[in-house]
Amino acid sequence: MSDIYVRYYEPIYHPNNGVLIMLHGWSGDQDSMWIFTQQVPEGFIIMSPRGIFPATHGFSWVEKESQEEQKNFKNYLFSANVLAESLIPFIKKKYSKAKIHLMGFSQGAALAYVLLLKYPKLVKSISALSGFIPAGYEKEVCHHQYNDSHIYITHGSDDDIVGIEHARKSALFFYQLGAHVYYCEDETGHKLSAKCFRGFNEFYREVLDIG
């Protein structure tokens, strides 16, 4: 596997074959997303990779730090390809029946969208927290390949960093592609509300078919 720094947790018992890859936002690191594991059903193997590029503080999935560069689909392809061609094959080799689930916040959610659009057969579900689909995605869509995809979109209606219109647009876009879309909007800013946080457990239990 290529050099990727990953925080990793493997439970003693993991009957559902679920592997959750958590993708932090800009200036985060491998520890930033760990709080969200509180609402993930027991049995998940969890991997939290650190962004490939250094940021002013922490790490990033995009090499350039300007806001315009972070909005562009093509600038996520390097990180997406590293994960798809290195980390995910490593997981598949170690856990032959593994089903890949992605969870991303902000820039990490954008990367999760890119991975799903580029590699729909590799990803079972994504949770996109306060995220957006990067501009220029239209040519990357693999039509009719998202019927088995499950997407949980959460966003704050008062988000002044990534506007709520991005979440609404993303939900409609994937719904029209045939994906199973779960949407939670709440009155908060660029963060996850308590209501949407609790929704994680219900979402993953349904995706994993846990009674």
Image (cartoon, rainbow, N blue to C red):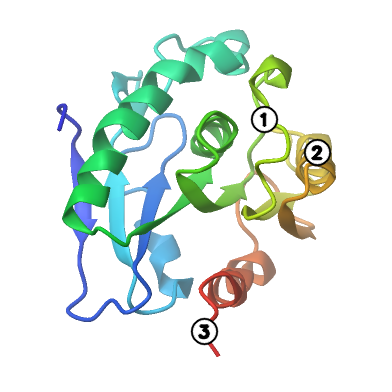
- Distance from label 3 to label 2 (Cα)? 27 Å
Q: Is residue 30 visible?
A: no
- Name the image quarter holding residue 199: bottom right
- Image quarter hosting the N terminus: top left
**Compared with residue 37, is residue 127 higher up or lower down, i.e. above or below?**
above
- Residue at x 60%, y 32% (from the top left corner): 117
Q: Of residues 33 and 87, which is closer to you in this image?
A: 87
- Distance from label 1 to label 3 (Cα)? 29 Å
- Residue at x 50%, y 45% (from the top left corner): 104
Q: Which residue, given by chain and number where applicable, does mark 1 sit on?
A: 133
Disc 2 vs disc 1: Cβ atoms closer than 8 Å? Answer: yes
Q: Is 73 left or right of 77, judged from the image as shown?
A: right
Q: Is residue 64 visible?
A: yes
Secondary structure beneath disc 1?
A: loop
Sooner in the amino-acid sequence: mark 1 or mark 3? 1
- Distance from label 2 to label 1 (Cα)? 10 Å
- Image quarter hosting the C terminus: bottom right
- Residue at x 68%, y 54% (from the top left corner): 154
Q: Which residue, given by chain and number where applicable, does mark 2 sit on?
A: 173
Secondary structure beneath disc 2?
A: helix
- Amino acid type at mark 3: Ile
Disc 3 vs disc 2: Cβ atoms closer than 8 Å? Answer: no
**Compared with residue 128, is residue 113 higher up or lower down, i.e. above or below?**
above
Q: Which mark is residue 14?
A: none
- Name the spot of residue 14 as percent of width and height, x first: 28, 76
Q: Which residue, given by chain and number where applicable, does mark 3 sit on?
A: 210
- Amino acid type at mark 2: Phe
Secondary structure beneath disc 3?
A: loop
- Name the spot of residue 124 as percent of width and height, x first: 51, 54
- Amino acid type at mark 1: Ile
